[in-house]
Every structure is written in structure tokens, then in C-alpha cells.
Image (cartoon, grey):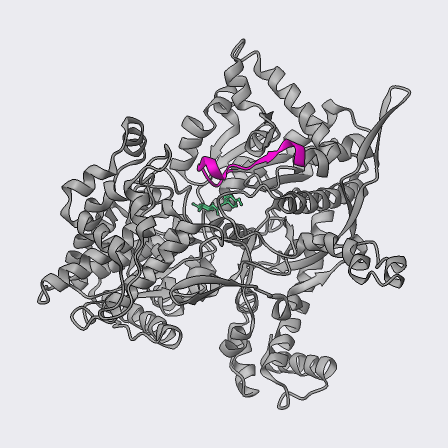
Amino acid sequence: MKKKELKSLLEGKLQRHYGVTASEATKNQVYHACAMVVRDILMEKWSATQEEMEAKKAKQVCYLSMEFLLGKSLKNNIYNLSMTDVFQQVLQEMGMDLKALEDIEEDAALGNGGLGRLAACYMDALSAQHLPATGYSILYEYGIFKQRIVEGQQTELPDSWLDSGSCWLVAKPDETVEIRFDGEIEESWDGDHLRIQHRNYTRVNAEPYDMLISGYGSETVNTLRLWQAKSPYSMDMHLFSEGEYLKAIEQQASAEVISKILYPEDKHPEGKSLRIKQQYFFVSASIQSIIKKHMETYGRLDNLPDRVVIQINDTHPAMVIPEMMRIMMDDHGLTWDAAWEITTHSVAYTNHTVMSEALERWPEALIKRILPRIHQIIVEINRRFCDSLWKYFPNNWDKISSMAIVAYDEVRMANLSIAGSFSVNGVSALHSQILKDKVFHDFYVVSPDKFTNVTNGIAYRRWLGQANEPLTSLIRDCIGDGFLRNAEELCTFAPFAKDASVRQKFLEVKKRNKERLAAYIQEHNGIDVDTNSIFDVQAKRLHEYKRQLLNIMQIIKMYFEYKDNPSLQRPSRTFIFGAKAAPGYYMAKQIIRLIHAVADMVNHDPVVQNHMKVVFLEDYKVSIAEILMPAADVSEQISVAGREASGTGNMKFMMNGALTIGTLDGANVEICEAVGEANMFLFGLKADEVEQLLKQGYQPMSYYQSNPWIARILGAIMQGIGRPGGRSVPFVDIANSLLISANGSQADPYLVLADFEEYCRAQREVDRVYSNQDAWNEKAILNVAHSGVFAADRSIQEYNEKIWNLTDLGR
Ligand code: 26W
């Protein structure tokens, strides 16, 4: 598009929507005008994509996920349309700056962490590779909470994102569907056909809002369909006229609460009825709309698996299995066997966690009350499933009961997901192996062919191309720009690691990115950080298994070492954290508080101030990650081995030229294979050693007794941490959690103390390598060059080959 044309489109939007000229328009109005112009362009491609899908009778993936952590759209869409330059020029002529407009947009943060961001990266890659896809989720009015730190502690504020975000949504009120909750099921025989009547149910409408998903250099524009809950009942006028105002609107409010807010829990599933309602609401709406569309096109359901694959992102959408059965049997008259055949050939399940406390289990009574028909179907699926297990495990009641879908008054969503799908995959090689060997071993024995691996990947054009322009243009200067379409070409950047002038340029690029982050830190934290120091970053949800504690303990040790020996010679460090804690996760919140106390102590101590700083970035989110990743020298991936399913932050850091300090966990294993052990800092127990140690009885107290540093650090934590001469805060519960087993539980279950010494050794190795800038930069460049396999494009290709078999719209 030419400058002139874009200019007149923008002026037209400003005129018609706001009645202003370009020179009168506010920034906010110009942002919306840009969004509208972009949306119009995408809308044409969107219609064309849909027509093509119909013409080709294309097979598409329906990606069901409770979370899509999208971040900002304006910049991404303009980039994908290759219109960045023309927008910049036109806006400049209008006296505006594209960057400033981008800042107006709030992140669409409809997710907690890795699982939600992965869904967003995959939608992007699907469009880029012209594969037909629809994402389905909930139009939460409030996304993940905004984190505010008050006196060193996390507080949560609501995140209302729609003011700046709704311009990306296309309302489709005509495609509203009805969802039914509660009530009773009445069965009656009509000849030999069982008729199901759902009586006294509560109705909630699901209204779709579509977001258009563009892909880099691609004509394919896919759909992300977000469902909003609306009450079909208006206010009760009778109650209102009696003066019962609140009661009059109660029914309406209780229906609409379903899409109000994203649950900020990302491990312990809460046994709350609202969460069940959210899951069923979005699953039922999505599958109803999928089946309706399919029936309109084909008039039959037996070929559904040839046209649609339903990928469920963890177990949260698992109710799609009984819901599909319900619709096909009760509404379309299919037999159980026919419906089961179609369902189990359509649904595929991705697992994202091995933590047993995170595997969803719902009280059966709750399901029975809220979803009486779904309950019946789950019970029948379970009966048949357990029957079928008998031939594998005759007389082995223990085994069958452990694999059952319904047992001990609970419904186990993972077991349901495995029984009802044709594919189960983990998200890194190690994780998928652990699923087969441990977590789902018995299921693997029964159906070994169901199990597969697809290692996660990232939308690298966002995380490198857009987030790190200086590095992108350095790579382009060296190897051309083919790598932006084919990430594998990044490996041709490897030989440049030996080129002194490229290493020098890489250093300058890193410096620029560190300056950008330093400015952000100065503005938001008021801390002056040294851009010559090592930027050492841990950014991810706060969880004990991710071991932010291990990191902060090493920082305390380093602080003591400088205090003991102020002339200690080491490269200086800036430790940077970004992390949200689930609001109800006490220990996670304590750890955030500890990080702040340590920051307070370190940053105000004249003796160590020039050697180290500790920074906590408030409200870590996608748009902060986009500033953070390019500026990192060291990427902390230090989870206890065997617990992190994959990690995707690790890939983003690597691609931006940070060196990983990490355990052999999740995708770190494959990072190590890709870049080589010499170009990262490995430490700690391996996954099998962790299991071994826990089994034989791990005694953290012995490390406390034998390692004086551990004793000193935990002593300090217990006594109180704070700035010299200021208030200090004791963290007794944290220290106890590492040392004392409370009512039978394992002390230090994530082996912080067992890995501490090794971690410190690896950190000294970081110092040693960094002292040789040239050697460091060579390794950093090699990390970039070998990160291509972590492009989401590759993951999507693997899903397509192993599981989906979609129609390629590009051919
Ligand atoms: C409320 C219940 C609940 C339980 C688990 C909500 C969300 C979860 C997710 C499975 C947590 C999650 O985000 N898992 C992460 O998924 C990423 C994408 O595959 C992986 O890279 C991370 O290792 C994994 O922790």
C-alpha cells in the first residue's frame, strides 16, 4: 500500500468515526483509526480464507483453550502485513509516532503463563503457514490481574482490557448459541429410541466475538472465537416493581459472571462451580458451533473427523468429549457407538504438566448437579472404559480403579481426556517420556500408539523480528532475510560467531537492548542499573518448582561474599525478576516479598551497590517480556528436573542471544542438544536422580548441617532481611519449608538445598566466561544461530504431520 492511500484511509476513519481531522485527532483516536484500517485489510483476507476453506472442503484444527495470552495486536498485525514502514511514515507526517500508539493498547492478557502464550504463538504460526484453524476460548472481561507491589508485597488489581482491545473483535450475534445448566434429565422410550429431556435448566447464551489472526507474509487469516456469556432473561419486572431491585437483576448477573474473569490459578485447580461452568460454557458453545457449521456444509456427521480435529489444550476443555457425545446422540440421533467413533477420532489432547496436584479432578456431585446430562454420559464412558481395561488387566482392580474416569466421588479429567482422544502428546521430549514412563504409564501400555511428543515452539517473528529489531537487522546483514520465513536458515548465522566484527556488532546490539531495558527500569523502579553488568533474568510465573528461591539464595550468598571481601573481583551483575504469584499461593507471595527484601538490602548497601543490583519488574506480561528478552545475558531455567513440562521463555531468551543457566529439564534438554553443552551452563540433579533421591528419603537438613553457606543464608532469612539500618523482615516460613517436614510432607520437595552448591558453581562459571567478552559473544551468537528448531512453525508442522493432517491453503 502506498503512503497516499493509507493516509486517506486513516483520515477517512477519523472523519467518519470521530468527526475530526488528522491534526485535531487525539492519540487515542489515531490508535483506533489505525486499528480499523488494519482490521478492514484483514477482514478481506479473512473472508477469502473462509471461502477457500469451503471451496477446498478443507480440514481445519479447532484449538480449544481456556487461555490465549495474546499481548498487543496493532504492532503484530502491521508487521505481519509488512506495513510497518508505510505506517511509520504516514504517522510521522501526521505528527504521530507508531511506537507511542502501540503503547496505548493494553495487552490482551487472557492467560496465566506458558500454556496461554503457547496457544497465541500457535495461532500465529498456523496463519503464517496457511493452515486453517479456529481457536476457541472465553471473552473474559478481566484478564490476568495487574500486579502492584506495595511495600514489597504483591497486591492484585483488576485488568480491564477491553477499552483498547475491543476494536479487534468482530461481533457475530447471529451465531449465538444456548448453553444449559442445572435441572433434571428425563428419559423416555420412543419405540427403540431413547429420548432425553432436560427440564428446569438455567439457560445462558454464548455470544461469539471473533478476533482475526494474521500470519507473517500469509494470505491466510484465521479466527479466534471468544465467547461472551449473556443472560437471555431480562430483568424480572415483577420483582422490580415490588422494590426488590437487586433480586430483579440477580439472575442476569449470575449468568454473565461466567465470562467476567480469568482464574489466576495456574497449578492447583480450584474445585469451584464457576470454573466448571466456564469450562462447559465455552466447550459447549464451541462444539455446538463446530457441529452446526459441519452439518450445514455436509449434512452428515460421520465425516466430521475428516474435516475437523479438536485439539484440547490441557484438560480444561475435556468436557468437549461428553458434550460431543450428547449433541450427536440426543440432538442428532446417533447411536452410542457411532458417536463414540466420531468423538474419539476427532479429539486430541496435549498435556502441559506432570504435577499431580495440577491434574484436574472435579467432585462428581458438582458435575452431577450443574451438568446432569454430561454426568450421565461420563459415567457411561467410564463404565465402558473400565470394561475394556479388563482384558488388559484381568482381576487387577487396583489398576483399573487407578485408571478409571470416575472414582472415589471424583471425575478425573486427564483420564477422560486420554480415553476420549486419539492422540496424547507432551510438550518436550523429556516430558513426553515422563508421561509414558510415569504419569500415564498404564494408559501407555494399553495404547502405545496414542502417545507422541511435540516440543513447544515460539512465534519467533514476534519474539525476535519485532521485539529485537537491532539483532534482526544484524542477522539480515549477515545471512539475508530468508530466516524470517524459514527459521532453519538461522543456522547459517553460526559461522559468523567466529567473525570478530560481527561479534563486536552483536555486543553493540545487546548494549542497545540493555539500555532500553535500563531506561524502563529507571522509569518504573527508580533504580540505576549498569548496562555493563551481566543482565541475569528469571521471568516466569512464581512457583516453588521453578525455584526462584534457588536464585535468590545464590544472590544472598554473593552479597555476603562482597561484604566479607569488598575487593572481590567479579563481573558486576543485575539480577532481574518478573513473576506473578497466584493470589492464594502463600509461599509464592512470600518469595516475592523475600526478593524485594533482598533487593532492598543489596541496592542500598554502599559496599556492594556497584557490584550487584536486584530488580523486580512489576506486572510481568507479554509486552514487558518483549523488552526483557532482547536485553538478557543470562537466562535462568532452574526448575527441579522432571517438573517443567517444557518452558518457552527459555526458547525466547536463547533466540535473543542469552546463555542459559539451567537444569536438564523440559526443553532445556533440547536446547542443550541444539547449542551444545559448551554454550550453556548446566547444573544440578537429573530427572531420574531427583526421583531416586526423593524415593530413598531426601534429608535437606543434612545439607544445612554440612554446607556453612546454606546455614548462613537460611539463618539470615530467618532473622530478617532488609536494608542496612532499616526495617528487616524475617521469613521463617520459607526457611521452614526447606528444612522441616510438616505433617508428613517432604521438606524442600523441590530440592533447592540439594542443588544449591552445584548452582553456585555454575554461576561462578558464568562469571568466568563473561570475563572474556569475546568468548561470551561467540557463545551468544551460537545460541541465536541454533534456536531455529524452537520456532512455532516447526511445532505446527509436527502437529500437522503427526496428529492433524490439515489442508494446506497455500497450495
Ligand atoms: C487451574 C488449573 C491449571 C493447571 C495447570 C491451569 C493451568 C495449568 C497449566 C497446565 C500450567 C501451564 O501453563 N503449564 C505450562 O505450559 C507450557 C506450555 O506447554 C510449558 O512450557 C510449561 O513448562 C508448563 O508449566
Regarding residue 489, the answer to whether it shows in the image is: no
* Point 87% across, 19% down: residue: 192
Q: Quadrant of the N terminus?
A: bottom right
Instruction: Count every numbered label the image shows and give the total.
Output: 0
Q: Position of residue 587 (x, y in %)?
A: 39, 50
> Where on the picture, by quarter, is residue 464?
bottom left
What residue range appears in magenta?
351-366
Q: Is residue 363 magenta?
A: yes
Q: Position of residue 805 (x, y in %)?
A: 59, 38
Regarding residue 661, the answer to whether it shows in the image is: yes
Q: Is residue 445 left or right of residue 736?
A: right
Along the line of sight, the residue nearer the viewer: 674 or 149: 149
Q: Is residue 797 left or right of residue 725?
A: right
> Where on the picture, by quarter, is residue 27?
bottom right
Q: Is residue 138 above or below residue 8?
A: above
Along the line of sight, the residue nearer the viewer: 159 or 309: 159
Along the line of sight, the residue nearer the viewer: 494 or 543: 543
Q: Residue furthest top?
A: 395
Q: Position of residue 591 (x, y in %)?
A: 36, 54
Q: Is residue 48 above or below residue 66?
A: below
Q: Is residue 168 left or right of residue 770?
A: right
Q: Position of residue 277 (x, y in %)?
A: 67, 45
Q: Is residue 549 magenta?
A: no
* Point 53% across, 14% down: residue: 397
* Point 14% across, 57% down: residue: 768
Q: Is residue 337 above or below residue 587?
A: above
